[in-house]
Image (cartoon, grey):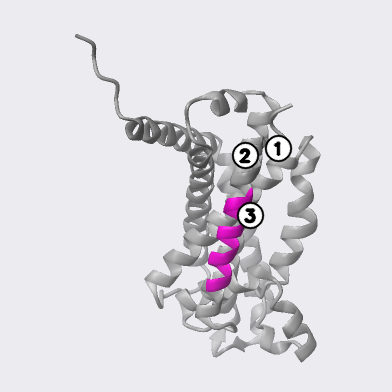
Amino acid sequence: MTEREPPPERNYLVAFNTILYKEISRFMRIWVQTILPPAITMGLYFVIFGHLIGPRIGTMHNFPYMQYIAPGIIMMSVITNAYANVVSSFFGAKFQRHIEEILVAPVPNILILAGFVSGGIVRGIVVGIVVTIVALFFTDLAVHSYAVTIAVVVLTAALFSIAGLINAVFAKKFDDISIVPTFVLTPLTYLGGVFYSIDLLPTFWQRLSLGNPILYMVNAFRYGILGVTDINIGTAFTVIVAFNIVLFFCALYLLNRGVGIRT
């Protein structure tokens, strides 16, 4: 009498959990490089922009300047770390040639994508929590809406995790994985309303800023924490979800076609 094989759904769950565990253990094992530096960097932002410059600026939307920028700084850490986790992990798998072992396994590409993205989400959330703890040493934060806050963090981390995987798919050398963060991600983050309200900008620049997707994420998260926003919260969620859907299917298409992976 032969032993029955486990159902495919169980095998898929094991595969997903394996990828997720690998991703989490990878960045937790080197936490001195992955978690500590963002906490120190964001702490310096609080000291320089909040403590030294903040008193000269005063209030913004009736909040002390340091309190106003805190949600943006937290979101900035979530964005950069979710992105960095997946782009470095997936490209590392390509470079070391063990991504092929995953691709030839009887696991759907959508599950592989979900595993890598979930790892990026976890790192983004972990770093976000650490930076929030650092922020509490400088200012008071009372959550206005837990549902909005959690939803924005998860969706934003997912979005930039997917973007990191797409970058890794096209990257051919290690220098390629730093092009997008340097020339695209960093400028969009600094111009995304992290340190200011777009109400301060002239009309033309306000309209131009609306083309920056990070503006919607920062403002939605700021609404979740402080209850104030420059962008309609419904519009913000629509933009974030739309970008997630588009990039998700783009990444899945690239994996199905084997772009940048199969030779």
- Determine which residue is flagged by label 1: 259
Q: Is residue 179 above or below residue 152?
A: above
Secondary-structure class at tag 2: helix
Residue drawn at the location 76% of the way across and 59% of the way down: 184
**Pair 3/1: label in front:** 1
181 to the left or right of 242: right
Q: Secondary structure at mark 3?
A: helix
Distance in Å between CA atoms under marks 3 and 1: 24 Å
Q: Amino acid at mark 1?
A: Val
Which residue in the structure is indicated by mark 3?
80
Magenta stretch prevailing secondary structure: helix
Question: Which of label 3 and label 2 is nearer to you?
Answer: 2
Which tag, 3 or 2, sits closer to the chain's start?
3
Q: Say few, some or many: other residues with alpha carbon within 10 Å of mark 2 (under 14 / 14 to 19 / 20 or more).
A: many
Density class for disc 1 (Cα within 10 Å; few <14, some 14-19, many ≥20) is some
The residue type indicated by label 2 comes to Leu
**Residue labelled with disc 2:** 255
Does residue 257 lie above or below 164 as drawn?
above
Q: Position of residue 6 (x, y in %)?
A: 29, 25
Q: Where is residue 78? Give x, y as percent.
A: 56, 57
**Residue nearest the observer in this picture, 188 or 195:** 188
CB atoms of marks 1 and 2 within 8 Å:
yes
Is residue 70 at all visible to an observer of this figure? Answer: no
Highlighted magenta segment, given as a residue range: 238-250
Q: Earlier in the sequence, mark 3 or mark 1?
A: 3
Q: Quadrant of residue 55?
A: bottom right
Q: Residue at x 41, y 74 (%)?
A: 143
Q: CA distance from mark 1 to mark 2?
A: 6 Å
Residue at 55% over, 47% down = 35
Q: Secondary structure at mark 1?
A: loop
Name the kind of residue labelled 3 in the image.
Thr
